[in-house]
Image: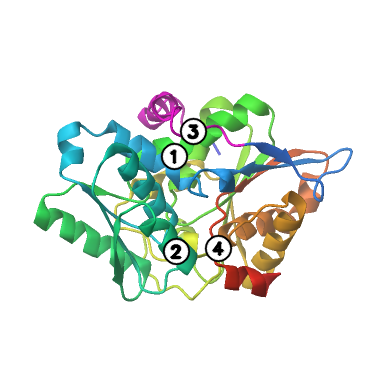
Amino acid sequence: MSKKLGTDQFIEIAKASARIKHVVAPTPLRLSKTLSDSDTRVFFKMENLNPTGSFKLRGAANKILSMTDAERKKGVVTASTGNHGAGVGYMCQKTGTKGTVFGPDDMSQAKYDGMVSYGVDVVKNEGDPINGEKNARKFAAENDIPFISPYNDPQIVGGQGTIGFELFSEVQDLDAVFISLGGGGLMSGIAIAMANLSPKTKIIAVSPSNSNVMMQSVAAGEVLDLPSDPTLSDGTAGGVEMGTITFEYCCDYVDEYLEVSEEELIEGLRIFIDDTNTIGEGAVGVAVAGYLKQQEKWTSKKVAIIACGGNISRSVLKEIL
C-alpha cells in the first residue's frame, strides 16, 4: 500500500505532542516475556497505565486544550462507552469545564464509575452506542455547547497519534503494530504517525467478530449502518458515525484487517494480564488475539501491540480469570 505523507493530520499529531506533554506522560513500552524469544521481539504499549486507564485521555486532552476559554466556558458534550468520557471528564476537572457524557445504558460499571468520579453528568441511552453519539450531537446543538466526538475529530485523532511518536522514539524499526479497531480514532492517529515516521511498519487492525462495523465498512467502500452483538471489547463496540474522517484514514493507512472471536480475545487478555501483571480490558485482548492469529508470520520480527486500556469491572475480570 502506498501511504500518503505530510498530511495536515500528521502536523496536528506533532502539535498534540507539544500540547499535551504536561498532562499525559509517555507510557512504557514493555517487552513481552510470553510472546518474545531470542529472535522475536514483541512489545506492549502500556496505554492502560494512563491516569484514566486508557489511551483516550490523549485525544481528550488535545481537544480540550485546543479550545478557547470562551468555548470551554460553555461546557462540553460528548458520547462514550466509558474511556473517552473519562478522558473528557479528567480534562474538564483540570480546566474547570462542565462536561456531559451520553453513553449506552449497558455500559461497564467500572467505566461508568470512572466517568462520574471526575464530576461529569452521564446520560444513559438505549440501544447501540451510536445512539448516544446522535443524541449527544442533538443536545449540543440545541444548547449551543461544543460537541467532542470520540473519534470523528482532527484533534482527537491527533492526540491518539502521539502514541505513534512515542513508539518510534523507542523502536525505529518496528515491523508491525497491532491495534484494536472501533471508531478508528486510535487506528488513524497511530497509522498516520507511522506512515510518516516508519513507512515500512505494517498497521494491522483487529476487531471482534461481534462488532466490526468499520472493518466491514472499509470492505464495502462506504460507512455502513450495521447492528452489533454484545462483546467483551466494549471499547470498540457499536456503529460508526456517517461521514467520519477516520473512515478514509482506515482505507488509506491500514495494511490488513483481522477479526477475532470472543473466546480468542479472552485468551489474549489472559495472556496480557499474566505477562504484564497489570489489568487490561477487552479491547486489549482483541489486539493480542490478532497477533496470536499471525504469530508465525512475525517470527524474528519486532512487533508492538497497543494495550489500549485497563478499565474492566471486577465481576467480569473475575469471570475471565
Which secondary structure lies at badge 4? loop
Q: Does the magenta stretch include residue 10?
A: yes
> Taking 234 as reference, is 166 above or below it?
above
Asked whether the residues under the numbered discs 1 and 3 touch, taking CB atoms below 8 Å apart as contact, a structural biologist would say yes
Q: What's the residue at 36%, 28% (across, down)?
A: 8
For the residues labelled 1 and 3, the Cα–Cα distance comes to 8 Å
Q: Earlier in the sequence, mark 4 or mark 1?
A: 1
Q: Where is residue 240 in the image (x, y as percent from the top left)?
A: 37, 60
Tag in front: 2 or 4: 4
Q: What residue is disc 4 on?
A: 312
Q: Where is residue 175 in the image (x, y as percent from the top left)?
A: 69, 36
Taking the spot 61% from the left edge, 56% from the top edge, the residue there is 284
Percent across and percent down for residue 161 are: 47, 36
Classify mark 3: residues with Cα within 10 Å, few (<14), some (14-19) or many (20+): many
What amino acid type is highlighted by mark number 1? Arg
In the image, residue 32 lies in the stretch drawn in magenta: no
Q: Quadrant of the C terminus?
A: bottom right
Q: What residue type is labelled 4?
A: Ile
Q: Which of the numbered marks, if any, corresponds to residue 58?
A: 1
Q: Are marks 1 and 2 in contact (CB under 8 Å)?
A: no
- Is residue 271 found left or right of 212 in the rendered image? right
Q: Give the range drawn in magenta.
A: 3-27
Of 303 and 225, which appears nearest the observer? 303
Position of residue 120 in the picture relative to residue 318 (left or right): left
* Disc 2 + disc 4, Cβ < 8 Å: no
Residue picked out by circle 3: 162
Q: Earlier in the sequence, mark 4 or mark 3?
A: 3
Query: Where does label 2 land, which residue?
Result: 213
How many residues crowd mark 4 within 10 Å: few (<14), some (14–19), many (20+)? Answer: many
Distance in Å between CA atoms under marks 2 and 4: 22 Å
